[in-house]
Image: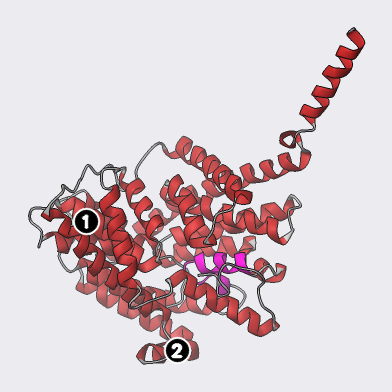
Amino acid sequence: MSEPLSKSSNARLQALLGHEFFAPLQWKRRIALWSGALLVALAAILFAKASNWAYALFLRVVAHGAWIPLIITPVVFALLAWATEGRLRATRGSGIPQVIATLHIEDQGFRARMLALPIAACKMLLTLIALAVGASIGREGPTVHVGAGLFYSLGRRFGFDDPKAASRFILAGGAAGIAAAFNTPLAGVIFAIEELAGTFEHRFSGLLLTAVFVGGVVSLGLMGNYSYFGQVQASLPLGHAWLAVLLCGVICGLLGGLFARLVLLSRHGPLAMIGRLRTRWPVLFAAGCGLALALIGMASHGNVYGTGYDQARAFVQEAAQAPGEGFGIAKLMANVVSYWAGIPGGIFSPALAVGAGLGHNIAYFLPHAPAAAVVLLGMSAYLSGVTGAPLTSAVIAMELTDNQSMVIPIMAACLLARAAASLFSPTPVYKDFAERMVRDFERQHGTTTGNHDDEHAGA
């Protein structure tokens, strides 16, 4: 009897060891993912610390004279535009459109140009230089770009160079990047589904969750359990205070769509002329943008420089040192000229600052609504209008302020904002930029980009 029992036990053990969980390929993938998530979290923390240092350096310089940006900002903007004209062109802008384009163009050469480690390193460095001269840009989009680049390079090093496998690594890296940048794990997953991929499949759901989880644990261990803007206890009672949802959704959505239309520089009308000027004289145009930013900065007493984090936090926390009434519009203009310059840098944090300023303005017309609640609605609605991603915007706003009591109002405002923004910009800004990259690639290579949910996928 013992021999059959022994054979049966061996068979069960062999079946267990032969399970997919123990497969060498699966463990190879897990190690690559865990290593990537660790690297992205460390890179995001380092980038955040360096960004704060770069902007603090700018503030120390400006303390010697408010006129100094009139000189240094145009000069450095011009140098950045010149430096990114050639091989470093992929470092320009937010970086999120580049990531989306690589998800829909499976060409290895294109992906290498957009996601190579030197591109990721230069993206961080050039963004820091821009912040050091007061550029109104954010670090979150570049962090997504860096995260996707790290995951893509690591995946290939571990042998996952199949186009489909590489796409999953790129997607997981982008999700880990946004989660680590804001310390918002849920928003990282939603962002990858809604903005980067536009779909959700079981084949990469595990990759996303694993990458975000590991990166979140690393961030938690090194930075502690914190909310980006601190804890906000605001709530919006039922009744006429809900007029805030309508006003913030429509006004902030329209202005978010207007911002998207301005930075996209359409091929027709006055904006097309601006685009032609930038194409013909990119370095001089960037210098002009730097000068415009410095003039806006002087007119706003220096409030529009940098990411806008301090100003947005002051509005949300109803702090006494919050900027004046014109901050929202001034910051919007600063964001436009900074993005027009074609320098590296994102729009997430600056968009949150604009939305907070607009919400602060709207709160004046709603004395019976809690001001912090209206600011929170304005912040999330404007971000939704700019990005065309209402779910991501709502989740980010809630995680940034550790506030769950505003779930329904925030979601309603974000959906209204997305609808209002479509009047100015039917295609979300990231998707539009990525579609242009896809079309340029197809035109150069005379190909189409395969099976996608949207033939113009990207952004």
Read off the residue under disc 1: 375
Pointer 1 local density, CA inside 10 Å: few below 14, some 14–19, many at least 20:
many
Instruction: Give the CA distance from mark 1 to mark 2.
Output: 35 Å
Can the viewer see residue 61 in this picture?
no
Read off the residue under disc 2: 267
23 in the magenta segment:
no
Q: Is residue 457 left or right of residue 386?
A: right
Q: Is residue 299 left or right of residue 341?
A: left
> Which of these two is toward me, 387 or 290?
387
Q: Position of residue 135 (x, y in %)?
A: 37, 68
Q: For the N terminus, give its image quadrant.
A: top right
Say if 226 sits above or below 135 in the image. above
Going by the numbered disc 2, the residue's amino acid type is Arg
> Which sits earlier in the primary sequence, circle 1 or circle 2?
2
In what element is the residue under mark 1? helix
Q: Position of residue 408 (x, y in %)?
A: 28, 50
Mark 1 and mark 2 in contact? Answer it, CB < 8 Å: no
Q: Which residues are magenta?
A: 89-104
Going by the numbered disc 1, the residue's amino acid type is Val
92 in the magenta segment:
yes
Q: Is residue 457 left or right of residue 67?
A: right
Q: In which image quadrant can residue 61 be found?
A: bottom left
Say if 56 sits above or below 317 in the image. below
Residue that sits furthest to the top in the current view: 1
Residue that sits furthest to the right in the current view: 3
Q: In which image quadrant can residue 75 be found?
A: bottom left
Main secondary structure along the magenta-highlighted residues: helix
Name the residue at 29% across, 65% down.
62
